[in-house]
Amino acid sequence: MPQRTHPRRVVLVVLDGFRPEAANAFTLTAFRRLSHGGAYACGALAGSPPFATTAMASVLTGVPPHHDGLTNDHFHLPRLRGGVRTLPRMLDDAGLPVSTFVRELPRLYRPLGRVVASRLGVRHPHFSGTSATEILDAARGTLQRQREGLIVLHWADAAVAGRAHGWASREYDAACHTIDATLDDLAADALLFDDPSTLLIGVAATEGESDAARAGHLEGRTPDASIPFFLAGWDVRPCRMGGPVTLLDIPRTIAWYLGVASPPMWTGRVLVEAFPHAKAA
């Protein structure tokens, strides 16, 4: 494993409801630039429903949903089984800060939200704003001050619009464009192309039946099981990462990038092909 000689930082943004076909159907310039200018994959979490809850939990725990107990999109306490060591707890043990920014919760759910964050090992959870723009506004101070460790943002604009108005609606289109514009702002605020120590990872979390699935063109598989994600930054080689690639590769890659050893029970691999001058352990 390469030795890190200066602080490293990962900014992870989860795009809730951002379906694979959205990037092609709409003119999303920031998403296209970051993904095609970095390392891009359309991976999956095999055998799991591709909800934002399961996607985010798997990225933060390093294990499939049957280990963390989050197998649906309902908000509840994770049941970590078999001595799971979560990514935030691993980083915290290594002295690296972890901050999360998600949309504001209803008053009744706020205590539960903090308990969930604590269960996952997050010391600095933030619940503020409802849109990607407002959540980024809440995170700006941390993006300026926290120069190492992990910063996680969860944007639900597309999911909210899709549920309320449909996945082919003008409102969903507008929400995807809002996310796209805010991705541009996030890259600028994180100094992505000025700071060689920052890695940006964007992960989509899909839901709802796609047009292709309804048309029966996918030979028994729904594209909702395919989750696009990208890695962007100075260290990243522009490439389309080949399979098999899964969401479980992301926590192991984050830990490796930050110089922290992954626990043996994590099943993912380091996406070393995205980093041309590195060798995975």
Image: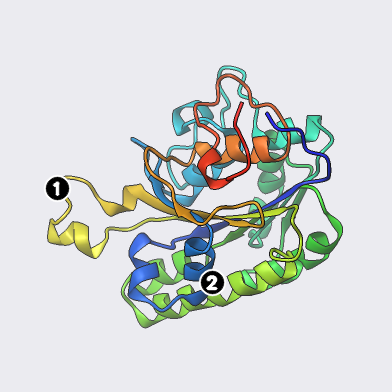
Where in the figure is residue 174, as x and y percent of width and height?
Answer: 45, 80
- Residue 149, above or below 171: above
Which residue is found at the position 32% from the left and 53% from the top? 224
Describe the element under mark 2 as helix, strand or loop. Answer: helix
Q: For mark 2, does the 10 Å Cα neighbourhood hold few (<14), some (14 to 19), or many (20 or more) residues?
A: many
Whole-number angstrom distance, CA of label 1 to CA of label 2 = 31 Å
Amino acid found under the numbered disc labelled 2? Ile
* Quadrant occupied by the N terminus: top right
Which residue is found at the position 22% from the left and 46% from the top? 221
Q: Which mark is residue 154?
A: none
Where in the figure is residue 35, as x and y percent of width and height?
Answer: 49, 62
* Quadrant occupied by the C terminus: top right
Name the N-terminal-most of marks 1 and 2. 2
Describe the element under mark 1 as helix, strand or loop. Answer: loop
Say which of 221 and 156 sits in front. Answer: 221
- Residue 208, above or below 280: below
**Which residue position holds label 2?**
179
Which residue is found at the position 65% from the left and 31% from the top? 86
**Which residue position holds label 1?**
219
